[in-house]
Image (cartoon, coloured by chain):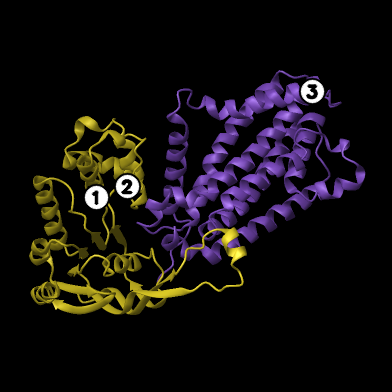
């Protein structure tokens, strides 16, 4: 059969339409609507801020910005992958009734989460505007980290969503792994509190790097060394490629097995 | 007029049906020393089929005989286990009406969502929007959420969008099973017009009257095999003998 272009105009329209209508539906049924997208991470932020800044007195300057940025980035990863994992199950009626490149389902799901992330980042900027920090040209470097982050999320989501068709308990396993990940990633604590010997393990986690470097860009006001950025690019590209390979291998079995 | 639009060459579709369901990692780990026993179920067995341009082809058979699987293979939703599938031209599957419909969106938003999924552009939908609403006779309800529609209203809306899609090949699976009589009549008219304008249509139905009325040729499917593909009357007769 003739293979069509995965990213033809028509397919991009489908992607856009699914992503936007899912975003509308995800929040419009609750009374507070879009406010919920902001409320969830802010609640978590408030609790952790009280515990770690006021009770335990972590010695970090601008801890509220430090913590909020970490939570927002982690939340994007956790929510996007957890929702994408089930994306074929939720889109069963679509996938079994009409043909379009299956990758669109995962792309749409992660893009919907990306829209939530953008709203959250706006809140971060509001916090930033009220802080002592002045605008710096290095802020723009954050965009590069966002792109790297998105490719990590996409790679993980592609792998999870297709593997989930074979192993239905992957959703529980992933939930547990995310919880472990939350504490193993320097989100609430600074890396400097961890004994030096463990640093190399921490930095094997690309999310730890993205969170750290984003903080440097916004709070410390300079851009981390380029070589460090190349490490992140390498990691995110590898994760994306591995995810894509797994997905391509399992793709054709999705419609008949969900 | 004699180009093959759809050509299936010795197509097999095998579903591996496990004797026991082992769908979780735990089950796979605990039982890993015992190979899972699978049974091969031939949903389609050695299918050869050619549909030429402008033909209206019917597919009949009992429930579970493989009619829908056949359409899904044509529509590229299922990949055949072996054999070739050749499709020449654009294709729109009406395997189910209202693909992608979302009850929490308004009817208007759903027209756009469904239209885009079926391959229309935004400009085309804007242009045809009035025709869609008129055909569905739902002018007063378009800002209502779809979940508040009756199932008949949903099908009317879905059918109205689906017929706006201009493609070479239409695959229809039981699309007329719902809707009231007057709407069914309207739909049959649409089919008549599609046929007149030289479109290629593959039509699965249990309604022998509409099969008789429209189909130039009909395939009778039983247990995943095409038992007969030829004149509609003869295929229907053969099918009725097996009941």
Q: CA distance from mark 2 to mark 1?
A: 8 Å
Label 1 environment density (alpha carbons within 10 Å; few <14, some 14–19, many ≥20): some
Judged left or right of residue A210, residue A108 is left
* Image quadrant where one finds the C terminus of chain A: bottom left
Question: Which x, y percent locates residue B54?
Answer: 18, 68
Q: Earlier in the sequence, mark 2 or mark 1?
A: 2
Which label belongs to residue B164? 1
Q: State which mark lies toward you, 1 or 3.
A: 3
| A238 is higher (above) or lower (below) than A82 | below
Please give the letter of the chain rendered in yellow. B
Q: Which mark is residue A53?
A: 3
* Residue A106 marker: none
Residue positioned 45% across, 23% down in the render: A31
What's the CA distance linking mark 1 and mark 3?
Answer: 61 Å
> Visible in this render: residue B34?
yes
Looking at the rendered structure, the secondary structure element under dot 2 is helix
Question: Where in the figure is residue B144, as x and y percent of width and height?
Answer: 28, 30
Contact (CB < 8 A) between labels 2 and 1?
yes
- Camera-nearest residue between A184 and B128: A184
Q: Are marks 3 and 2 in contact (CB under 8 Å)?
A: no
Q: How far from the left and from the top, in percent, is residue B183?
A: 12, 46
Q: Quadrant of the N terminus of chain A?
A: bottom left
Q: Residue at x 51, y 60 (%)?
A: B23
Query: Which corner quadrant of the image does residue A147 belong to?
Result: top right
The residue identified by callout 2 is B115
Chain that is purple in the image = A
- Circle 1 SS class: loop
Mark 3 belongs to which subunit?
A
């Amino acid at each position: 059969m003739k293979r069509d272009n995965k990213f033809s105009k028509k397919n991009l329209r489908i992607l856009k339409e699914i992503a936007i209508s899912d975003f509308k539906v995800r929040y419009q049924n609750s009374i507070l609507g879009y406010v919920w997208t902001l409320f969830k991470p802010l609640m978590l932020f408030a609790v952790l801020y009280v515990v770690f800044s006021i009770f335990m007195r972590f010695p970090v300057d601008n801890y509220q910005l430090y913590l909020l940025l970490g939570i927002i980035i982690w939340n994007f990863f956790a929510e996007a992958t957890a929702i994408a994992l089930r994306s074929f199950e939720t889109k069963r009626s679509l996938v079994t009734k009409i043909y379009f490149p299956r990758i669109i389902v995962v792309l749409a799901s992660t893009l919907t989460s990306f829209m939530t992330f953008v709203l959250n980042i706006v809140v971060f900027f509001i916090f930033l505007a009220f802080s002592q920090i002045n605008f710096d040209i290095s802020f723009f470097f954050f965009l590069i980290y966002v792109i790297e982050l998105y490719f990590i999320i996409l790679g993980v989501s592609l792998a999870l969503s297709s593997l989930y068709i074979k192993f239905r308990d992957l959703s529980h396993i992933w939930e547990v792994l995310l919880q472990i990940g939350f504490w193993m990633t320097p989100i609430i604590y600074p890396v400097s509190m961890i004994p030096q010997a463990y640093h190399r393990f921490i930095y094997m986690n690309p999310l730890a790097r993205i969170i750290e470097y984003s903080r440097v860009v916004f709070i410390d006001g300079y851009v981390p060394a380029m070589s460090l950025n190349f490490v992140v690019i390498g990691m995110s590209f590898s994760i994306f490629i591995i995810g894509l390979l797994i997905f391509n291998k399992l793709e054709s079995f999705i419609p008949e097995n969900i | 007029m004699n180009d093959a639009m759809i050509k299936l060459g010795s197509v097999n579709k095998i579903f591996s049906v496990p004797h026991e369901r082992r769908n979780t990692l735990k089950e796979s780990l605990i039982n890993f020393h015992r190979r899972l026993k699978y049974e091969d179920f031939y949903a389609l067995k050695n299918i050869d089929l050619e549909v030429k341009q402008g033909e209206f082809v019917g597919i009949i058979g009992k429930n579970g005989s493989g009619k829908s699987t056949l359409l899904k293979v044509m529509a590229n939703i299922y990949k055949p286990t072996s054999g070739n599938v050749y499709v020449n031209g654009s294709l729109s599957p009406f395997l189910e009406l209202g693909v992608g419909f979302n009850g929490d969106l308004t009817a208007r938003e759903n027209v756009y969502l469904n239209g885009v999924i079926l391959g229309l552009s935004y400009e085309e939908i804007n242009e045809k929007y009035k025709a869609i609403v008129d055909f569905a006779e739902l002018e007063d309800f378009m800002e209502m959420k779809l979940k508040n529609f009756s199932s008949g209203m949903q099908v009317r809306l879905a059918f109205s969008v689906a017929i706006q899609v201009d493609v070479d090949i239409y695959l229809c699976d039981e699309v007329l099973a719902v809707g009231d009589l007057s709407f069914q009549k309207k739909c049959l008219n649409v089919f008549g017009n599609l046929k007149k304008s030289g479109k290629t249509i593959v039509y699965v139905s249990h309604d022998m009257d509409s099969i008789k009325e429209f189909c130039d040729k009909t395939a009778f499917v039983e247990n995943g095999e095409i038992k007969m593909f030829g004149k509609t009357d003869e295929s229907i007769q053969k099918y009725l003998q097996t009941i």
